[in-house]
Amino acid sequence: MKEKTMNIKLLPREKVFRDPVHNYIHVQHQVILDLINTPEFQRLRRIKQLGVADYVFQGAEHTRFTHSLGVYEITRQICDNFAVNYPTQTPGDGLWDDNERLVALCAALLHDIGHGPYSHTFEHIFGTDHEAITRRILTDPSTKVNAVLRGVAPDFPEKVASVIAHTYPNPQVVQMISSQIDADRMDYLLRDAYFTGTKYGEFDLARILRVIRPYRGGIGFDANGMHAVEDYIVGRFQMYQQVYFHPVSRSMEMILTHLLERAKTLYEAGKFDTRFNPRLLIPFFEHQFNLQDYLRLDDGVLNTYFTYWLDYPDLVLQDLASRFLSRRPLKSVAFTNQTARLLPKLKALVAEAGFDPEYYTAENDSFDLPYDQYDPSVADPKTQIEIIQRDGTLEELSTLSPLVAAISGKAIGDKRFYFPKVMLSKNADDLFAGTYTKFQQYILNDSLIEPR
Amino acid sequence: MKEKTMNIKLLPREKVFRDPVHNYIHVQHQVILDLINTPEFQRLRRIKQLGVADYVFQGAEHTRFTHSLGVYEITRQICDNFAVNYPTQTPGDGLWDDNERLVALCAALLHDIGHGPYSHTFEHIFGTDHEAITRRILTDPSTKVNAVLRGVAPDFPEKVASVIAHTYPNPQVVQMISSQIDADRMDYLLRDAYFTGTKYGEFDLARILRVIRPYRGGIGFDANGMHAVEDYIVGRFQMYQQVYFHPVSRSMEMILTHLLERAKTLYEAGKFDTRFNPRLLIPFFEHQFNLQDYLRLDDGVLNTYFTYWLDYPDLVLQDLASRFLSRRPLKSVAFTNQTARLLPKLKALVAEAGFDPEYYTAENDSFDLPYDQYDPSVADPKTQIEIIQRDGTLEELSTLSPLVAAISGKAIGDKRFYFPKVMLSKNADDLFAGTYTKFQQYILNDSLIEPR
Amino acid sequence: MKEKTMNIKLLPREKVFRDPVHNYIHVQHQVILDLINTPEFQRLRRIKQLGVADYVFQGAEHTRFTHSLGVYEITRQICDNFAVNYPTQTPGDGLWDDNERLVALCAALLHDIGHGPYSHTFEHIFGTDHEAITRRILTDPSTKVNAVLRGVAPDFPEKVASVIAHTYPNPQVVQMISSQIDADRMDYLLRDAYFTGTKYGEFDLARILRVIRPYRGGIGFDANGMHAVEDYIVGRFQMYQQVYFHPVSRSMEMILTHLLERAKTLYEAGKFDTRFNPRLLIPFFEHQFNLQDYLRLDDGVLNTYFTYWLDYPDLVLQDLASRFLSRRPLKSVAFTNQTARLLPKLKALVAEAGFDPEYYTAENDSFDLPYDQYDPSVADPKTQIEIIQRDGTLEELSTLSPLVAAISGKAIGDKRFYFPKVMLSKNADDLFAGTYTKFQQYILNDSLIEPR
Amino acid sequence: MKEKTMNIKLLPREKVFRDPVHNYIHVQHQVILDLINTPEFQRLRRIKQLGVADYVFQGAEHTRFTHSLGVYEITRQICDNFAVNYPTQTPGDGLWDDNERLVALCAALLHDIGHGPYSHTFEHIFGTDHEAITRRILTDPSTKVNAVLRGVAPDFPEKVASVIAHTYPNPQVVQMISSQIDADRMDYLLRDAYFTGTKYGEFDLARILRVIRPYRGGIGFDANGMHAVEDYIVGRFQMYQQVYFHPVSRSMEMILTHLLERAKTLYEAGKFDTRFNPRLLIPFFEHQFNLQDYLRLDDGVLNTYFTYWLDYPDLVLQDLASRFLSRRPLKSVAFTNQTARLLPKLKALVAEAGFDPEYYTAENDSFDLPYDQYDPSVADPKTQIEIIQRDGTLEELSTLSPLVAAISGKAIGDKRFYFPKVMLSKNADDLFAGTYTKFQQYILNDSLIEPR
C-alpha cells in the first residue's frame, strides 16, 4: 500500500562519498542525493560538529555535514541487515518492513539540519531551538529540502519530521535514529574519536551491526552481543568525561557566551557602533528572524563579525573577540554544591584585580546521563536498551552488565568556576600579587576549598 | 657562540597537543608555545589546508593550523634523531649542530603563516603573494610573531625568514623545511591521506625518520632506506593524481575564480551595490591593502560575503555564489594541445545554450613534477634526493629506482575544459536538445575529440 | 656504585626490530641483543601467546617471542620517560634512579621465558611451574641466558630473577614489570587486540606513558590521566570476557587436557604402543625431567605427537587427537553453584549416548579479578593503582572511578559444562534421539536449568 | 541447468570468522563451512604463510589458514558486486553468471591446500609439487575435501581443480583466483603488510572492489580506477623488494636447505643414527610417500626433528639445526653475472677459515616479474590487466601508467652470496684474521668487487 503512494526512484548505479570513518557512504536513492544537494544541507559543511572543541583537540575540525552522512550510512547498513535477516512476514510480527527504509534514511540524514553555528551557545543567547527549526526546514514549503521530500509523497515531509519528533508510529524507525544506542550516537562517537585522535569513543561497530535486531517494541540486541553494547556505553561515557566536557573547551564556550552577550547588550542599549555592523546577526539582535535569516548563519559568519569587533571601541567586546579568535581561555577550578558559597568571594577578588566578573568569570556545569533504564515517572523517559535472549525474552542492559549498572541513572560531570589566568600568577612583583595569593588559597588539587 | 646571543627558554615541563596523525605534538621551548599563541598563527585555524577539496573528499576539513604543527613535529623528530646519532664534533664535519634546532623548528612552524583563504585562487585574482607575506609576518615589527622571534635575538626573525627563503647558510636546515622530501611534504601527505580517508599518500614515516641523515651538502638517506624514499615519491605522485588534481575540486576552484572575478569586475566598474558590501575585501578590490587587512581574512570571511551575494541583484554573481556555497560544480572533459583548437566551438555551443562562456566555461591545467634531478640550467633548480652508500658516496635517487626514474623530470597532470552540466543532458524534449547533442559529439571516453 | 660493578655495553648504533604493535622495538644494550639471541629466548618463537585461542580468533597466531619484545619496549619507554622527567636527585627522594634501567629491561624481556607449550594445560597435567622454570633459566649456569646475565655482574642473574619474584628492593622496578598495570599487561592487551582483530583491549598507551610516574612506593599516575587508566582496566575486563574466556577456546583446552591425560594414563598403565613414541615427552610421563628436557618442548613438538596418535590403536586417544588437530570442539552450557547438582544427570545422558564422560564431558570455571584494592589480609595481596594528586597525595583508583569500583574486588567469569555436540541434535530419526531430547530439556538461554 | 545438478545448501544464518584484515569472513554455504572443517584444511593452521620471514619481520607468524579464508572472502565480495551490478542477461553477453559463484568460492578457499611446510625449500629438496598435490587433495576420493566437494555434484571436484589449473572454461572465474591481480595476491599483500607491520603492501582494496568488473575475456577495471590498480602493482613490487626478498630471510632459507640436504645425505649414505629418527619424514627420504604421508607434515613436525638433531653426532647437522632454531643467519653480499667469477675465491677463503663451503656458503637469486603484458610467444603467458574505457574499449594497464610501464616485463631482484658472519670480523687477534681481511677486500657497499 505504501509503495503505491510513494515515488521512490533508485539511481541507475549507486553513488559513493569517500569517508574516512565508514570508508564509503553509499547512496542508492535519487531523493537522498537530491537532499544532500540542497542548500540547507550543504550549509552544514560550514558548521563544525564539535563547536569549539578543536581549540583543545585540534583535529576536531569536522562538520555536521560529514556526521549527517555518517548517520545516514549506519542507518542504511542497519536497514540492509534487517531486510536480509529479519524481513516481516505478516503485519505485526515485530520484524522489519523494508517499506520503512526511505523514511528512516531521510530522518537519519536530516536529523541535525536545524543546527546553527556554535549551537548550544547560540540557542542560549538568542532563544532559537534547533529541533523546532529542523521541523520547519522539513515541513516549510519554502525550503528545497521540503520540495525534495514532497516529491516522494505529499505527507512525506511530515512523516520524516515525526520520526525526528519521536511520534512516528513504528518504534523501530524512531529508535534507529534516536535512542540510547542509535545511528546518531554511533556515528558521532566513532567520528569524534577519529578526528580528535583519542581512542575512548571507539567501539566495535561491525559487531553491533551484527547483533542488532528488530522486535515488536523497537530495536534490541542479541544476547551474545551484550559486551559490544556495554563497550559502546562505556566508550560514550569516556568521551563525555575526556572530550566533550574538557575544561578548556567549556572555557572557550564561556568566552563565546560572554562575547555574544556583550554584543547583544550593546545593541539593545542602542549603543551599537554601526561601522561594525553584524549584518546577518541583526535579525537575531532584533528578536525578529525568519527561517531564511537562520539559514544564512554559519561558523564563519559569526567569526567574521568577531573579526570586525577586534577594532570595536568597547574594550570588553574587543578583548572577548580577541580571546575567542586567538584562543586565550579562562582558567578554572571544580566546585560543588557545598563549596559554591565561596564563589562570591572569588568573584570579589577577580573584581579587585580589575576584571568585570560579569564577563571575566563564569560558572559552568556539564552533566550527562550515560545510560538510564526506562522510567515512566520522569519527563522524557529514556528508551532502555534491551538484550534479547535466545528464547526471545528481553533483559534490560544494566541487569546484565555490572559496568553499565555502575553508571546507570547517575548524571556524571562537574561544575567549574572560570576566571582570568593571571589570578594564578606567582609573580610577587605584580601590582595585584596580594590579591592573587588570596585567590590561590581557595584552590587545592583542582578543587575549590575553604582557605586554611 | 650562537648560544650566548640567543635567549632560549625551555618549558618547565613539555606541553603536548593531541594530534590524530602524530598522536602528540611535543612542545619543549617557550618560544614555540608563544608563537602558537599569536593571533597570526591562530588565524590558520580558519583556513582549510586543501581549500575546496572537501567538496570531493568530505573529510578534508582540516586546516593549515594542524598541518603547521605537524611540520613542526616532524622537524623536531628529525632534530632529535640528528642530535643523538649525528652530532657535530668539529665545525665543517658535515654533521648536525644542535644550535640550529630552534631556527629549524620556528621555520617549520611558520612556513605557511602567510597563506590566505583559498590561497592560490585568491592570489591569482588579487595579486597577493603568500611567500612575501610570510616574510612580512616574520620580520614586520607590528606582528606578534615578530615580537616573539625578536625575544630570542634581534636577528632571529631574519634568520627564520631566510630559512624559508632558502638563503640560510646551513643547507641541512633549509632542506629539512623545503626540498623534495621535507617535513612539509611529509606532513601534508600523511595528513591529507588521513583526513580524506584515501591511502595513496601513506608512506613509512617511521622508517624515513630512521634513515634520514645529515651530510655536508644537506640531508640524505641511508642506502638501506632507499625503498622507503621511493615509496614516498610514489605516494606523493598518487596523491596529486587522485586527490589534489581531482576534476571536481578543480571545478569548484574555477567557480570560485569566476565568482571573485565577477565581484571585482562589478566593483571596478563602479556598480557595486553597497548593501552587500564585503567590508574586509574592499582593500583588495581597491588594490590598497596592508598586512593588517590581509590578516583579517579567512575562509569564513569570504564565505560570509558569498552568502551576502546570494541576494545580490546581478544574476551571474548570485548564481556563482550559490553554486559555490551549495556545491554545484561544472562538468569537464580532458583536452590536449592538439584538441585545444576545438575549444572555441564548444564555447560557442555553451553560449548558444544561454550561458556566458566567460563565467560558465573554464580551462584548467594542473601539472606537477613528481621528482626531478638537480639541473643547474633551469630557473629554481631542485635539490635532488641523495642516497648515501656505506662508504659515504652519494647516489641520486632516480639512478637507483626504476619507479622514480619513470616519473622523474616529467610534469604529470592534464588539461580540462569546464562547462555547465546541462550540456550533457540527454533529454530530447529540452529546448536546447540539438545544441546539447552537437556538444556531446565532441566527447569520447572523457576526452575531447573531433566529431565523427 | 652500581655502575662500577656492572659491565654495561651500549651498541654502537641502536638496533631495531619491526613490530606491528609498537612500530619498532629499539635495542640499545649489547646484553639485550645477546639475550634475544639465546636459544632459550628464540624458543619462544615456537610457543603461541594465546595457546588455543586462534581456534576462535584466527589471527591470534602470535607468539610469546613478539610479546616478550613488546614488554621490553614498553618498559624501555617508561624508563626513558622517568629518566627525563623524574630523575632522582638524592637517594630516597622517590624519583627514578636510571641505574635500575638494565635490570628492569632484562626482567621485562625474560619474564615469560619459562613458559612451555600450551602453558596452563601442560602445567596442570605434568606438574611443571613456569615461574620456577623462569627462575631456573635465569640462574642455572647451564643456560645461555645465565651466561649473558653473568657477563653484566656475578649477582645480576639473581637480581633479575628477584624482580620477577617481586622480592627486588626497588618497588618501582617490580611494579613496572608486575602489577595491576604493568608493561606485561599493557603489551598483551594491545597485542592480543591487534592480532585477534577485536577492539576491546585497545587503550591509550601514549597517554598512559605520559601520566605514569614514580613515587616512593612504586609507580603511580597523574590525576589528569585517571580516565586513561580507567579505560585500560575496562579494556582488560572486556578482553577477559570476550576473548580469553571464550567458551570455544575453553572447549579446545578441555580437549587438550583430556588428550594429554589419556596419553599419560596409557603410559602409566604400561600400555603405551612404542611405535607412537613421544620421544621428547617421555621424561614428563616418567616424572623425571631436567631443564634441558623442558627447553626442547614447544607447540609444534606436542602437535607432532598428536599427529602420531591419529593412528594410535586406542580409539579415545585417536579421536581426541583428531578433535584437537582438526578443531572439533565440544559444546557447552553455563552453570552455577545452584545448578551444579544437575551435572551428574547430564553426564549420565552423555554416557547413555555412548561417550565416556571422563573424556567427553568437562567442567571448566574461568574467573578473573579485573582489579582489586590492596588488602593485606589476603594471600598475595594486589598492589593497588595509585592516582597522584597535584599536591602529591595518593588516591586509590576505585575511589575516583565508578566504573572501576563496579568491578573492583569481584571475580568475574563463569562455569561451563562441556559435552559432545551431537547431544544438541534435533534429528528425530537418530538412534539416541530420545536421550538427546532429555538432555536438551536441561538447557535454556545458554544456562543449565531444571527441566520443566 | 547447472542449478538442477548441483546440491547447494545455504546455512540458516551466515556464520562469521573474526579476521583482523577483513574484519569478518562471511560464510553462507554449508559446503564452505564443511570444507573449512576438514582435517586437510585445518592442517593449514600449522603452516606459516611466509615460511621463515618471521625471523626478520617478527609479526609474520600468520598461517596459510587465515590467508586461505581471506582469499575466499575477497572472492565472495567480488561475486556479490558482480551479482548486483553486472548480472548476465543472455548467455555470452560477457556479464556475470552467479551460478559460477560456488565453484569460484571453493577454488578460492582451496587454492593453497597442497602447500607443505616451508613450501619452496621442501619442494626443492624432496621433489614434491604443491600444485599437483592440491589437485590430488581435491580429486582423490580418500580425502575429506573430496567427499565434501562430491556432495555438491560428482564432477564438482574436477571443476574446482580445473579453476586452479586455469583450464576452467569461464575466464572470469579463473582470473578471479589466478591472474596478475587476483583475490590471492590481494589478500596476501594486505595480510602480510598487516602482520609484518610494514606499509608497503597496503593498497585501496575498497576502491578496487568498486571498479572491478567482468567482461567477455575475464576481469577488467573501470577507467576511473586505474590509479588504484597502479597502486596495487607498485605495492606488490615494494613488498617483494622489501619483505619477500629480504636478505636475512633468504639466509634462513639457505640454512634450512642445507640442513635438509645434510640430513638427506646422511640418510642416503645409510649412516642415519636411528635414535634421532624423523618418523614422518622417512617416506620422503625413501622417495616413497603417499598423500597421507604428505598431509601429516607441518612446520612443527620439521622443527621437532630439528630439535632432535640438536643432539645428533654429526656436527654439521647439529650446527645447522641449531642455527635454524636459534636464528643464527649467514651474512651476504650482492653479486652480478659479471662478479660471479669471484665466488670460487670467496668460497676458498671460507674453506680456509674452516667451514665446509657446501654447507656454509650459498648462492641465491630471487627475482620477480612485477607485471607483464600478455605475450603469446612465451611459455605460460600472463593475463594482462585490462582497463575498460567508458565506451567499452580495453586498454592494457602499462600503456596508461608510466609507473607500471617502468617495471613491466622486467624481472626485478638480485643475486646474493651467503657466508659465515665471522668472515666479516675485524678482530686482529683472531687466528684467521688474515683470511678475513682478504675476504673483506672483495666487498664494497654491499656488493662483490675485484679487490683493489
Image (cartoon, coloured by chain):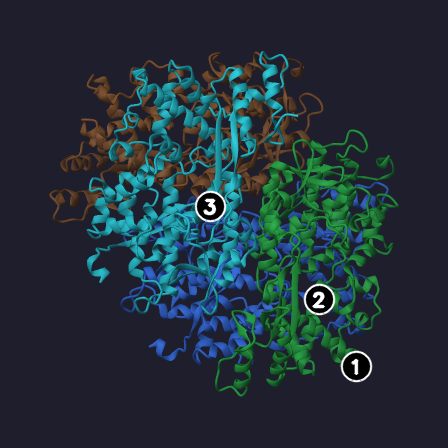
Chain colours: A brown, B cyan, C blue, D green
The Cα atoms of the two marked residues, 2 and 1, are separated by 21 Å
Quarter of the image where one finds residue B322 = top left
Chain that bears disc 1: D
Describe residue A410's horizontal placement relative to residue A161 as left or right.
left
Amino acid bearing label 1: Ala
Q: Is residue D244 visible?
A: yes
Please tell me if label 2 and label 1 are on a single chain: yes
Mark 3, secondary structure of its residue = helix
Q: Which residue is mark 3?
A: B189
Element marked by disc 1: loop
Q: Is disc 1 surrounded by few (<14), some (14 to 19) or many (20+) residues within 10 Å? A: few
Q: CA distance from mark 3 to mark 2?
A: 41 Å
Residue at point 29%, 65% (across, down) = C93
Nearer the camera: disc 3 or disc 1:
3
On the image, which quarter does residue D356 sit in?
A: bottom right
Q: Chain of mark 3?
A: B
Crowd band around label 3 with a 10 angstrom C-alpha radius: few (<14), some (14–19), many (20+)? many
Residue C198 drawn above or below residue C150: above
Amino acid found under the numbered disc labelled 2:
Thr
Front residue of B60 and A58: B60
Residue that carries the numbered disc 1 in the rendered image: D269
Q: Residue at x 83, y 46 (%)?
A: D159
Residue indicated by mark 2: D121
Q: Callout 3, which amino acid?
A: Leu
| Chain containing mark 2 | D
